[in-house]
Amino acid sequence: MGIDLKFLFVRAGMMGWLLINLSVLAKSIQDGTLSKSMILFQIFCALYILDYFVHEEYMTSTWDIIAERLGFMLVFGDLVWIPFTFSIQGWWLLANEVELTTTTIIANCLVFLIGYMVFRGANKQKHVFKKNPKAPIWGKPPIVIGGKLLASGYWGIARHCNYLGDLLLALSFSLPCGISSPVPYFYPIYLLILLIWRERRDESRCAKKYKEIWTEYRKLVPWRILPYVY
């Protein structure tokens, strides 16, 4: 039919997430309760969602598109889980007032920017490498193990560095809510559990697929997600 169902569902989920956020924003404006926290949350999420559509091509190099089978988990996750759980922070801010200091706002923005830089940069490097294995990484020839595995740039820092970027972005969506309740942190906590599980699955899959090449990569890049920690 010429329709990629995986992309169709994830597009619908991302647009649903944005629509729910905008509805929450409209409600806060209508009630006269629009706060700096709400504005910060809305800006971060909108930028993240917009970035997805601008760089959608990079999704073709991700696990979800390459290997994840289209079934209930993927469809439910895209159409229900993403829009209705990733927007929890906005709903929470409607009912709870949070005052942010200038220092807090700056720190929150730094978390978002660092997360975005790592997340987008790592995914772009992987995508470019798959299209052209000789393309420079950070202005230098790439280090390639066995002609298959990139060990330069972000991928020379941690084996799943894109997960670190994603986690920092998720955290930045919740930080505008303060620390008085765990409810707004559902998304980053859930994502942390998911990505650690996925990282373990990735490690097992890559060990079977690349064998001694993967062993060499692990020696060269010992850190899984967060350098010097994990």
Image (spheres, rainbow, N blue to C red):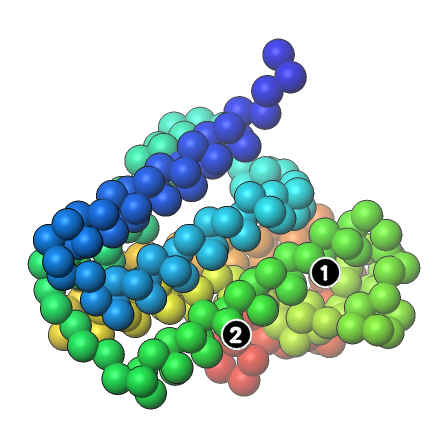
The amino acid type of the residue labelled 1 equals Gln
Q: Position of residue 220 (x, y in %)?
A: 73, 76
Q: Secondary structure at mark 2?
A: helix
The tally of labels here is 2
Q: Secondary structure at mark 1?
A: helix
Q: Position of residue 100 (x, y in %)?
A: 24, 79
Q: Position of residue 17 (x, y in %)?
A: 35, 43
Q: Is residue 172 above or below residue 45?
A: below
Taking the image as shown, residue 230 lies to the left or right of residue 129, namely left
Who's the residue at 52% across and 74% down the image?
114
Indicate which disc, 2 or 1, sits on the residue closer to the N terminus.
Answer: 2
Q: Is residue 182 above or below residue 211?
A: below
Taking the image as shown, residue 186 lies to the left or right of residue 228, namely left
Taking the image as shown, residue 34 lies to the left or right of residue 109, namely left
Who's the residue at 86% across and 56% down the image?
133
For this rendering, which residue is in front, 187 or 224?
187
Mark 2 = which residue?
A: 114
Q: Quadrant of the N terminus?
A: top right
The amino acid type of the residue labelled 2 equals Ile
Q: Is residue 21 visible?
A: yes
Taking the image as shown, residue 111 lies to the left or right of residue 81, namely right
Mark 1 = which residue?
A: 125
Q: Among all residues in the image, which is located at the extreme bottom? A: 103
Who's the residue at 25% across and 51% down the image?
25
Q: Position of residue 129 (x, y in %)?
A: 79, 56
CA separation, marks 2 and 1?
Answer: 16 Å
Q: Viewer-nearest of labels 2 and 1?
A: 2
Q: Are marks 2 and 1 in contact (CB under 8 Å)?
A: no
Hey, which quadrant is residue 221 in on the image?
A: bottom right
Hey, which quadrant is residue 56 in on the image?
A: top right
Q: Is residue 48 above or below residue 139?
A: above
